[in-house]
Amino acid sequence: MYPEDLKYTTEHEWVRSPGDAEGSVRIGITHFAQEALGDIVYVSLPELGEQVIAGDTCGELESTKSVSDIYAPVTGEVIARNEALDATPELVNNDPYAAGWLFEVVPADGADVDGLLDADAYQAGLDG
């Protein structure tokens, strides 16, 4: 159910490596997360050039049900944001693994993308 080419966090973010820019990774939320949130109506993302730290809050998703934090899955510099989400935040619900991506980060030296969960481990965590 979850794409095999992605890495995952226990906070329900996914990481695609490589991202669009050389050396970057693209980040979004999983189908599970967007379904749990319900209809997303507003997205707050980190600013370009911002340094994010793995595990720290770096944005928010607001839905008709609640507000949920976005956590940085890796430490690094934000180099791209999905500006389409300003006008169409529902892309996160409709296409969480493609058009609904959130932002891209160039991981800092030593940032461990490979240490994140694979699809099977993420699914196993959901199954409890």
Image (tube, rainbow, N blue to C red):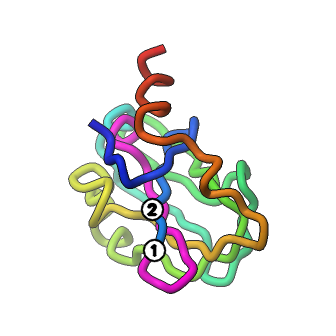
Q: Position of residue 104 (x, y in %)?
A: 52, 72
Q: Is residue 109 above or below residue 59?
A: below
Asked if residue 44 is among those painted magenta in the image, a careful observer would answer: no
Judged left or right of residue 16, residue 88 is left
Question: In the rendered picture of this protein, how many numbered marks are placed on residues?
Answer: 2
Q: Position of residue 41 (x, y in %)?
A: 35, 53
Quarter of the picture containing the N terminus is top left
Question: At 41% across and 29% down in the image, what residue appears?
Answer: 123
Q: Nearer the viewer, residue 90 or 1?
A: 1
Q: What is the span of residues highlighted in magenta in the rendered image? A: 19-34
Q: Amino acid at mark 2?
A: Arg
Q: Which residue is mark 2?
A: 16
In which quarter of the view is residue 109 placed? bottom right
Pointers 1 and 2 in contact (C-beta within 8 Å): yes
Judged left or right of residue 86, residue 44 is right
Question: At 73% across and 63% down in the image, what residue appears?
Answer: 111
Q: Position of residue 35 (x, y in %)?
A: 32, 36
Circle 2 sits in a helix, a strand or a loop, which is it?
strand
Circle 1 sits in a helix, a strand or a loop, which is it?
loop
Q: Amino acid at mark 1?
A: Gly
Q: Nearer the viewer, residue 35 or 43?
A: 35
For the residues marked 1 and 2, what is the alpha-carbon distance in whole angstroms? 6 Å
Question: Dot 2: few (<14), some (14–19), or many (≥20) neighbours within 10 Å?
Answer: many
Question: At 29% across and 63% down in the image, what residue appears?
Answer: 98
Q: Is residue 56 above or below residue 23?
A: above
Asked if residue 24 is among those painted magenta in the image, a careful observer would answer: yes
For this orientation, the residue located farthest to the left is 94
Question: At 27% across and 60% down in the image, what residue appears?
Answer: 91
Judged left or right of residue 76, residue 78 is left
User: Residue 70: which numbered mark, if any?
Assistant: none
User: Residue 19: which numbered mark, if any?
Assistant: 1
